Image (cartoon, coloured by chain):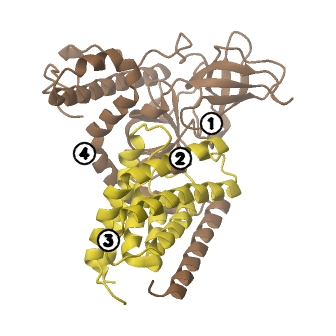
Chain colours: A yellow, B brown
């Protein structure tokens, strides 16, 4: 994987993370917000496979853990996005990933994202994690992510595939 | 899949790395430097993106507050989309001007020395961090654990400071605790106020279990002189008591406090960098228990009252903030 390809993916992650905190989190939607970073990580993983999906997921989570205005214990997002990147990478496809697969992976991935993150928070005694908020946040994140999935995941993986030659490396 | 065994190995290594990070951050504050660094590096980018996208964001957040604009909005629907967009933008500018005025008023009353700032990014999403980033930092003399206010009262405290941006933990975050006193006719009661998350009121717990707070009583920050008034300076209005739970399981009494600040619509704030030696606890609280409605600035502001716009502000021509 050349430096250019890596930088391109890292740039995508940074753009998504910044748009999340500056634009998306400002919109007062009922039940939380969509998670752009998850959609980009899934898109990259579809094109790059489980190993790189996990690597870029880790980078994405690390970024989200430290990008202002993060105010939680660092490493939690790195952990959950690594799992998501790996899981989505199992559905790697050198051609286009079908809409149905995309939506299913995004739905399960979003639910896993919230559940794992809140689970780790529960272990660490995070006062923000309550049952009511957990269900609210889970539902909101899954619904909004699924709605946005076809518009973000597919272009991202199409772009990533163009940079990534097909075949074994 | 190319090499399942290697992929699993990478997964395990990365998860261990993440766990290590969590352990380090849970047990020590040694990652604070990394946070400040991230604030220094990414803060300016966020600020630039925020400058560009602010009109869009204002438009979206004005949708969230449509209840109060209902009649106004019905009329607007008849306008064409161009006009509608311009009107939202100038509404945002007017809001901003009103916010600045109230902030100056509060800071002036208290003789706080403040550094004004603007919110550039928001926590939230599935992490539910009730935090914001603001566009001033160590280069402007801001330090960690300083009080952040707006024109209505207490916003929170700084938790991470980069060179030109900082992160603020809002008072409604469940991890936020503020030492407070109750303002009333009788002696001053002391307690703490904790956040309960976005769109929820705050919880007040009193140290003494002999007296009960009363509905309508105002709550202000305590401000501990022994810690140099950090993280909270004294007498900043926080909210008023709306409900009292007399004996919460036999422990000290608790009460629900409605905050003066609307944490979902933060824009212009200020960091208190110096506080006068003495402020009386009730000096800064609003006269009535309910905060004044926030958007009552008249449409036709006279040019003299608009220092930032030298020309009369007409909806189409005013400059962007």
Place of residue B203 in the rendered image (x, y in percent of width and height, measured from the top left): 67, 30
- Disc with the residue nearer the chain's start (3 vs 2): 3
The answer to whether dots 2 and 1 both sit on one chain is no
Q: Residue A96 carries which label?
A: 3
Nearer-the-camera pick, B15 or B150: B15
Q: Report whether mark 2 lies on the same chain as mark 4.
A: no
Q: Which residue is drawn at 56% across and 54% down?
A: A114
Q: Residues within 10 Å of mark 3 (few under 14, many from 20)?
A: some
Q: Position of residue B316 (x, y in %)?
A: 14, 26
Q: Which residue is drawn at 37% across and 33% down?
A: B61
Q: Do labels 3 and 1 share a chain?
A: no
Q: Mark 3 lies on which chain?
A: A
The outermost residue toward the bottom is A169
Where in the figure is residue B104, as x and y percent of width and height? 39, 24
Screen quadrant of the N terminus of chain B: bottom left
Q: Is mark 1 on a helix, strand or loop?
A: loop
Q: How far apart are marks 3 and 2 (CA)?
A: 28 Å
Alpha carbons under labels 2 and 4: distance apart = 31 Å
Closer mark to the observer between disc 3 and disc 1: 3
The Cα atoms of the two marked residues, 4 and 1, are separated by 32 Å
CA gap between label 3 and label 1 equals 44 Å
Q: Name the residue under label 2.
A: A139
Residue A136 is left or right of residue B142, and the answer is right
- Give the secondary structure at mark 2: helix
Residue A150 is marked as none
Which residue matches tag 4? B52
Tag 4, which chain? B
Q: Quadrant of residue B177?
A: top right
Residue tagged by mark 1?
B196
């Amino acid at each position: 994987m050349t430096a250019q390809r890596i930088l391109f993916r890292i740039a995508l992650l940074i753009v998504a993370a910044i748009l999340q905190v500056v634009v998306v989190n400002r919109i007062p939607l009922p039940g939380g917000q969509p998670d752009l970073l998850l959609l980009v990580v899934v898109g990259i993983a579809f094109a790059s496979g489980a190993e790189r999906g996990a690597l870029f997921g880790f980078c994405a989570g690390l970024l989200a853990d430290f990008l202002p205005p993060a105010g939680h214990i660092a490493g939690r997002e790195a952990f959950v996005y690594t799992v998501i990147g790996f899981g989505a990478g199992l559905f790697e496809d050198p051609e286009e990933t079908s809409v149905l697969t995309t939506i299913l992976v995004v739905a399960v991935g979003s639910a896993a994202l919230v559940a794992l993150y809140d689970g780790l928070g529960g272990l660490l005694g995070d006062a923000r994690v309550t049952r009511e908020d957990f269900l609210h946040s889970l539902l909101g994140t899954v619904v909004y992510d699924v709605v946005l999935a076809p518009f973000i995941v597919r272009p991202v993986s199409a772009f990533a595939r163009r940079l990534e030659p097909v075949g074994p490396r | 899949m190319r090499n399942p065994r290697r992929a699993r190995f990478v997964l395990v290594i990365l998860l261990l790395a993440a766990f290590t990070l969590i352990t380090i951050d849970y047990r020590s504050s040694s990652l604070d430097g990394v946070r400040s660094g991230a604030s220094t590096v990414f803060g300016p980018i966020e600020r630039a993106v925020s400058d560009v996208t602010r009109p869009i964001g204002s438009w979206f957040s004005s949708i969230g507050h449509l209840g109060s604009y209902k009649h106004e909005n019905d009329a607007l629907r008849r306008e064409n989309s161009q006009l509608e967009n311009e009107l939202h933008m100038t509404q945002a500018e007017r809001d901003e001007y009103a916010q600045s005025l109230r902030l100056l008023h509060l800071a002036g009353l208290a003789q706080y020395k403040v550094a004004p700032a603007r919110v550039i990014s928001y926590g939230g999403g599935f992490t539910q961090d009730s935090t914001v980033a603001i566009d001033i930092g160590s280069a402007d003399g801001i330090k960690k654990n300083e009080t952040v206010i707006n024109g209505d009262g207490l916003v929170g405290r700084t938790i991470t400071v980069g060179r030109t941006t900082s992160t603020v933990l809002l008072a409604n975050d469940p991890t936020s605790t503020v030492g407070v006193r109750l303002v009333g006719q009788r002696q001053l009661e002391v307690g703490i106020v904790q956040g309960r998350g976005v769109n929820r009121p705050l919880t007040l717990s009193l140290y003494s279990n002999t007296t009960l707070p009363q509905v309508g009583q105002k709550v202000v920050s305590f401000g501990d002189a022994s810690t140099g008034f950090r993280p909270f300076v004294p007498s900043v209005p926080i909210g008023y008591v709306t409900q009292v739970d007399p004996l919460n399981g036999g422990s000290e009494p608790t009460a629900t406090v409605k905050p003066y600040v609307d944490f979902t619509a933060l824009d212009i704030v200020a960091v208190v960098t110096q506080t006068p030696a003495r402020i009386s606890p009730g000096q800064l609280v609003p006269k009535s228990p309910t905060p004044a409605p926030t958007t009552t600035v008249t449409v036709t502001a006279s040019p003299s009252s608009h220092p930032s716009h030298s020309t009369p502000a007409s909806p189409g021509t005013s400059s962007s903030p």
